Image (tube, rainbow, N blue to C red):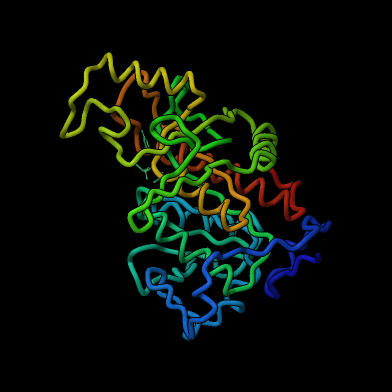
Amino acid sequence: MAYILPASNRSMRPDRNTYDGKRFVHVKNPYLDTMDEDILYHLDLGTKTHNLPAMFGDVKFVCVGGSPNRMKAFALFMHKELGLAEGGEDIKDICAGTDRYCMFKTGPVLSISHGMGVPSISIMLHELIKLLHHARCCDVTVIRIGTSGGIGIAPGSVVITDTAVDSFFKPQFEQVILDNVVTRSTELDKELAEELFNCSKKILNFPTLIGHTMCTYDFYEGQARLDGALCSFSRESKLDYLKRAYKAGVRNIEMESTVFAAMCGLCGLKAAVVCVTLLDRLDCDQINLSHDVLVEYQQRPQRLISNFIKKKLGLHDQIS
Ligand SMILES: O=P(O)(O)O[C@H]1O[C@H](CO)[C@@H](O)[C@H]1O
Ligand SMILES: O=c1cc[nH]c(=O)[nH]1
């Protein structure tokens, strides 16, 4: 399939075709087709109010992360990295009509914030996946670029998730539907994880590993922290839990990966989770990095994904 360039950008023409088949987004809801209009309420977009195929039809990479500022910074960074000259400084928030999420588009890359935790990212993903469907996007890769707490690895390491696991170290996400619990798989694309890992090897001084990521429903008690407003367990129990997690293959902890993996998997989207670790949870609970170090750490997943996207677009000579 030929990759279609946005008219405004001649400099990012790929030197070879990297997409060999059309993978469309699957929405699995028979009611959607019967609806006259679909209002994507939390994104402030809709099928009657916006020409979604014209606005988003060329999207190939969607990057998501908790913080609106990080996702804006990523969009600006990608804009520069893709050699898109004009309009970078005043890149517009497509979801400016709502303050739930923000969304920026640069060339074939969409950058969206999802807030913190499973309910927040899940609402965004429902509307994002419908958006990609309505826009008739194909061959889309979705990547979460986030922060996390590491287990037994140096702060600043980048973890590429092979499997997202729940608080019991199980590769599953439990969705309550009506009064049933539906269990969904949280496997991620292993080939994509390997490809990202290979990309990381080309960046100097870039500690990266592939491992399981544990997704919790809370930052404090849910992640065995001793410094929340509530704590009912001992330091020994905390360390015992985290060491058992390590033994089960868990290398970092965050709060969105299981539902992200489950929803992307069910809807036929290639997906990856790439998170930098801000601390080693075997050593401490509080994040006490200086502002500059925190900013540099948060840029690591962005640098890796930028290199990956440039490679996929045939711009792989510009490794940064
Ligand atoms: O770095 P982001 O994407 O915000 O994600 C991580 O940071 C938040 C907690 O501080 C949680 O949402 C966790 O998953
Ligand atoms: O420890 C941490 C750090 C970032 N995000 C988390 O969810 N946990």
Quarter in which the N terminus is drawn = bottom right
Quarter in which the C terminus is drawn = top right
Give the residue drawn at x 46%, y 55%: 71
Relative to 223, say whether 299 is above or below.
below
Give the residue drawn at x 52%, y 68%: 29
Instruction: Point out residue 179 in the picture as x, y percentages from the top left corner.
Output: 33, 54
Q: Quadrant of ligand 1?
A: top left
Looking at this view, name the residue that lies furthest to the right. 16
Q: Specify the quadrant of the image occupied by residue 121.
A: bottom left
Q: On the rendered structure, is 250 left or right of 313?
A: left
Residue placed most toward the observer, 59 or 24: 24
Instruction: Point out residue 233 in the picture as x, y percentages from the top left corner.
Output: 21, 22
Give the residue drawn at x 30%, y 20%: 238
Instruction: Point out residue 244 in the picture as x, y percentages from the top left corner.
Output: 42, 19
Q: Specify the quadrant of the image occupied by residue 223.
A: top left
Instruction: Point out residue 151 in the picture as x, y percentages from the top left corner.
Output: 43, 23
Q: On the rendered structure, is 75 left or right of 244?
A: right
Looking at this view, name the residue that lies furthest to the left. 229
Give the residue drawn at x 58%, y 28%: 209
Relative to 241, say whether 182 is above or below.
below
Relative to 115, say whether 136 is above or below.
below
Number of numbered discs overlaid on the protein picture: 0
Relative to 307, say whether 228 is above or below.
above
Q: On the rendered structure, is 304 left or right of 18?
A: left
Looking at this view, name the residue that lies furthest to the top. 236
